[in-house]
Image (spheres, grey):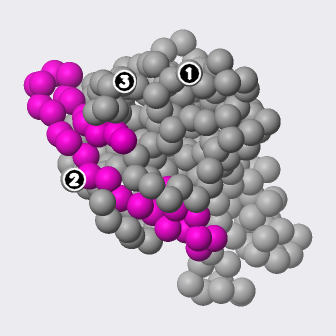
Amino acid sequence: MTQRPLKRRDAVGLFLVVGVVFCTVGCEENLGSRDSLDVPFTMYGVLSPDLDTQTVHIYVPDEYPMLLPSEGLDVAVFSTDMETGERVRWTDSVLVRSTGMREHVFWALFRPDFGRTYRVEAIRPSDGARSYADVRIPPPVTMRIEEEAAPLLQVFIQGDGVRVLEPKFEYVVGASHINPGGFSITIDYSAREQLSENDWKVVANMIVDYEEIRFIVGASNLCREILTLDTLKLHVLIGDARWDPPGGTFDPNVLAVPSVMTNVENGLGFIGGGYRKTEYLYPSQEAVESACFVYVW
């Protein structure tokens, strides 16, 4: 077992865990009675083809959880590709945070494949007790735009059994009188994604975004003569359909309740499968100019 500081790859792979673990494991009032903790392990993590190193946090549920564990865990962690049967044993490490808190993080060097299902299991060697989660990595998605009601820009995201989360539109705009190099401004549309038949839909109100961007860059009351739209991108998190937090947001006060969002059998917690997707969008000149941007494409 090794000790290591928190690295960027851990932070990326654990974006779900950061807001949830401390409430679920570290706060006694959110854990429930001793009867509800009669399971071997709590597991949190994300499997992602974006990462070359997969990580999962493992905890032993306790009515009085210790934030500073002084002993190693009696646990072995494995992942199995449910299609090929390939089984990988994960390595134990201790993550030391700036607060001095120590957490057991198991990791393995591999990239899960799109569309595959993996079983992540924690086994207690002393008695064989086991907690596990089956994690499906969503397949690649495609995106298309519709402009029937410009300047409303509808982006449809198509994929088999996926959940779209945390959509954000990134506008790269030019304002030569202020900054010849341009500005990159991200407008958060989280929790505004919609399920439309079999596709997900995110609708950008470009004229409302224009007003917000104009305020941010300090532009005047002029319209077309002020801001050019140089680039427009959509950033989303693509998760499996089971990755469905209430309201579409990761509210730690809600997710701290073990029954709200869990896929761990004979245990607590959640292990998600997903990846981040960035798509360049090319709205028409009509859509761009109807939102008061100058069209430059």
Q: Nearer the viewer, mark 2 or mark 1?
A: 1
Q: Is residue 189 located in the magenta-colored stretch of the structure?
A: no
> What amino acid is at disc 3?
Ala
Sequence-earlier tag: 3 or 1: 1
The answer to whether 78 appears left or right of 195 in the picture is: left
- Specify few, some or many for label 2: CA neighbours under 10 Å numbering under 14, 14-19, or 20 or more: few
| Residue 176 position within the rendered picture, expressed as x and y whole percent measured from the top left | 65, 84
Give the residue drawn at x 32%, y 25%.
127
Give the residue drawn at x 67%, y 34%.
63
In space, the residues marked 2 and 1 are separated at their CA atoms by 31 Å
In space, the residues marked 3 and 1 are separated at their CA atoms by 11 Å
Q: Which mark is residue 127?
A: none
**Furthest residue to the front?**
126
The answer to whether 200 appears left or right of 19 in the picture is: left
Label 3 SS: loop
| Residue 295 position within the rendered picture, expressed as x and y whole percent measured from the top left | 58, 61
Q: Which residues are magenta?
A: 74-103
The residue singled out by tag 3 in the image is 129
Label 1 SS: loop
Give the residue drawn at x 28%, y 33%.
125
241 above or below 276?
above
The residue singled out by tag 2 in the image is 109
Give the residue drawn at x 36%, y 41%.
74
Q: Nearer the viewer, mark 2 or mark 3?
A: 3
The residue singled out by tag 1 in the image is 38
Quarter assignment of residue 165: top right
Whether residue 48 is visible here, answered yes or no, is: yes
